[in-house]
Amino acid sequence: MHIEPGIVDGAKMALAYTTAAGAAGYTAKLAWDDLAKSNMGSFALRTAIATIGTFIFFEILPHFPVGVSEVHFILGTTLFLLMGAAPAALGLALGLLVQGTFFAPSDMPMFFVNVTTLLVPLFAMHAVASRFIPEDKAYVDLAYSDVLKLSALYQGGVVAWVAFWVFYGQGVSVDAFQSVATFGAAYMLVLLIEPIADLGALAGAKAIRSGKLKGLFTQRLYNAA
């Protein structure tokens, strides 16, 4: 999910700066909430793992350009379930920054656009998860249907934001609709894979449940809220 440079430019980039700043502010709030339940060492470790994971998702895993953007296996739901909302958000932003700075500098002009596209769906997923996942259920006990809902929400949110940036930056036209439709159809292939990856990650976490690994994952992974 790297929106092509030039899709949004000039004065219209002001909106991207604003939305990214809002995402940063909400991430700070989530971080504060997380630190109230954990500790700085665990938080920093989970953020580092999420950052490395994001870099791998964007730079190493298969990815290919489709129309106005690229299709990546972001696995944002996996990061959320294992690391927590705040470390996942920071990891997505930092991983994208590292990948863009050192390996794809041509993407950096769209950094704030791409950060918004990654983080806002994550926040929406976090809000919905707190509503439909019972408080007495740990994440390792989620069913496939639960994981599918979260993945569909996240991936659908990414596609929706890509569509928004295209129409905002380029205007509403037949070409814009075709580009968005092509990207959306290709990106939904990720939805076929991510829930399986999520369940695999949760199964692995369940198998290695250990007090020694307590700080490696978000508390909600093993414990009810």
Image (cartoon, rainbow, N blue to C red):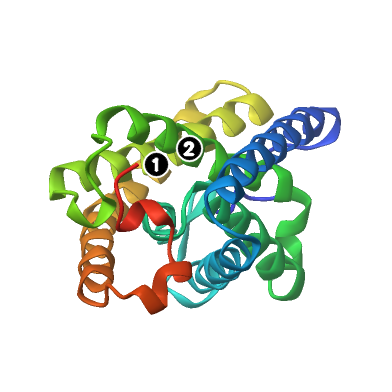
Front position in the image: 44 or 191: 44
- Residue depicted at x 24% and y 73%: 204
- Tell me if label 2 and label 1 are in contact, CB under 8 Å: yes
**Percent of width and height locating residue 198:** 28, 60
Can residue 175 be seen by looking at this rendering?
no
- Residue depicted at x 26% and y 77%: 208
- Residue depicted at x 22% and y 68%: 206
Relative to 169, does residue 101 appear above or below in the rendering?
A: below
Label 2 packing within 10 angstroms: few (<14), some (14-19), many (20+): many
Q: In the orientation shown, which residue stands out farthest toward the top?
A: 172
**Looking at the image, is mark 2 or mark 1 earlier in the sequence?**
2
Label 1 packing within 10 angstroms: few (<14), some (14-19), many (20+): many
Front position in the image: 123 or 215: 215
- Residue depicted at x 29% and y 46%: 224
Q: Residue 121 has which mark?
A: 2
Q: Residue 204 vs residue 51: left or right?
A: left
Look at mark 1 in the image and give the residue it sits on: 154
